[in-house]
Image (spheres, rainbow, N blue to C red):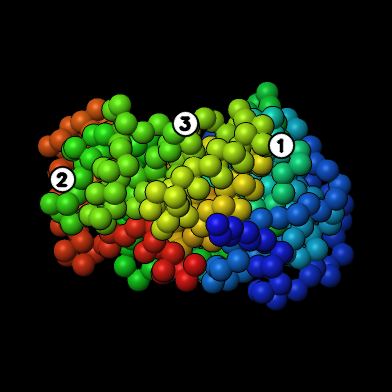
Amino acid sequence: MSRNRRTFLATVAALGVAGCTATLPDQIGSDDDGPDEADDGAPPSDADEGSDGELLFDFRDIHEWDLAAGNLSPDREAAVTGEVSARLDGERDPVLRIDRTGLDLDLTDRRLSIVGRVHSPEPSQAVDVIVTDVDGNRMRFRTRFFKTDPETEFMPLDLGIYEWDDTAPDLAAIDTLRIQTRFDENAGGTLWVDSVYLEPMPETPKLMIQWDDGFETQYTNGLPILTEYDIPATTFVNTANLGDGRLTVEQLTEMQEAGWEVGSHLMTHANLRDLSEQEQEAQIRGAKEWLIDNGFEEGAEFFAYTYGSYDRTGYALVEEYHTYAMVGGDPGYGLPRNPIHVGRASHRSLEAAREYVDTLVQWGGVGALFWHEIPAETTLPEFEGIMQYITDRREAGELDVITLSDLAALQGR
């Protein structure tokens, strides 16, 4: 059994990023006009060792950032890219926000990723990067941290397109970049930002179609429609929940022969956060072993988090056993810097799915749509309409429909 262990420090060494040498004050200041606890040692870090990303910012230049909400201070005890990270704390205001202006930044063929960590009592935390062009038009990118306990380490996360102004921004003329988060008022928290990267994008936008939980309707209803439109897919199954309304080994084999991949969704549909480390490893290892033993070796490298979430232990184990892992997210990512946290969306109506595809075609990048079963989530005519729309965009040369194996080949994994 192969194990695909990666470390962020190896990435940093490969990039050859220099350490920080600037002398910085202990505190930059605070403000309370924002909008809509840490350990002392630098922790280990996890990330993708195969990214071709370009370092945009580290925080040796912290004086060039303007504080708009919360407290900002340089943290020399917690950093991985250089010798300092930006530490953002909130006292009276749950919003934390810093801005950098005068950038002259071109994002037309690149997307952003962020290296950071969050400590909070909440199990997850959204972080936004908002870019503004020279005419004041904005686009918001979003990611979500699921590792928030006090022992969590720095990690890289890709940012997907979340929303933009009525007048679309000119991504070739970005003047301002804002990093922002909003903690629950009763929970609070701390965000560290180590660095921001620019990630390459595929020449043609890429879309994946995926399924969870192994319901039999994926075979009886989904397979015929996807076969008609020559659209491949990945199904993530609970390997201990087969038959009796769920897919059988014979059906999975037939789906694989039709171009589908069969990946892991644990042995049972347990929530990793509810399991001990030993139970997590048994579920993750056992599901992968079952897939390999039953002829699904290629798909065994791929994983989808149950309930779309994980904790620090579950993330480390998934990273150890798998090449890619799927969570929830927004479209328009660059090629994944972090393959163990790849975004996908549950836009299952025709209108919502078309909007998702249109966003991907308009702005580029990588995206994925997923279902559990049809017609329970989407009527058959509507599902077929979604696949027809995807096919039309593909035949127009505006979109490629790929699998995770295709993505792995594209990234050389």
Q: Between 54 and 210, which is closer to the camera in this rendering?
A: 210
For the residues labelled 2 and 3, the Cα–Cα distance comes to 26 Å
Q: Residue at x 39, y 53 (%)?
A: 296
Upstream in the sequence, badge 2 or badge 3?
2
Residue type at mark 1?
Answer: Asp
Q: Which mark is residue 49?
A: none
For disc 1, the marked residue is 149
For the residues labelled 2 and 1, the Cα–Cα distance comes to 45 Å
Of badges 1 and 3, nearer the viewer stands: 3
Do callouts 2 and 1 mark residues in contact (Cβ within 8 Å)? no
Residue 64 appears in which quarter of the rendering? bottom right
For the residues labelled 1 and 3, the Cα–Cα distance comes to 23 Å
Upstream in the sequence, badge 1 or badge 3?
1
For disc 2, the marked residue is 224
The location of residue 244, given as percent across then percent down, is: 30, 26
Q: Which mark is residue 269?
A: 3
Q: Residue 167, can we see it? A: no
Residue type at mark 3?
Answer: His
| Crowding at mark 1 (Cα within 10 Å: few <14, some 14-19, many 20+) | some
Q: Between 397 and 172, which is closer to the camera in this rendering?
A: 397
The quadrant of the rendering that contains the N terminus is: bottom right
In the shown orientation, is residue 398 left or right of residue 112?
A: left
The location of residue 49, given as percent across then percent down, is: 60, 66
In the shown orientation, is residue 295 left or right of residue 374?
A: right
| Crowding at mark 2 (Cα within 10 Å: few <14, some 14-19, many 20+) | some
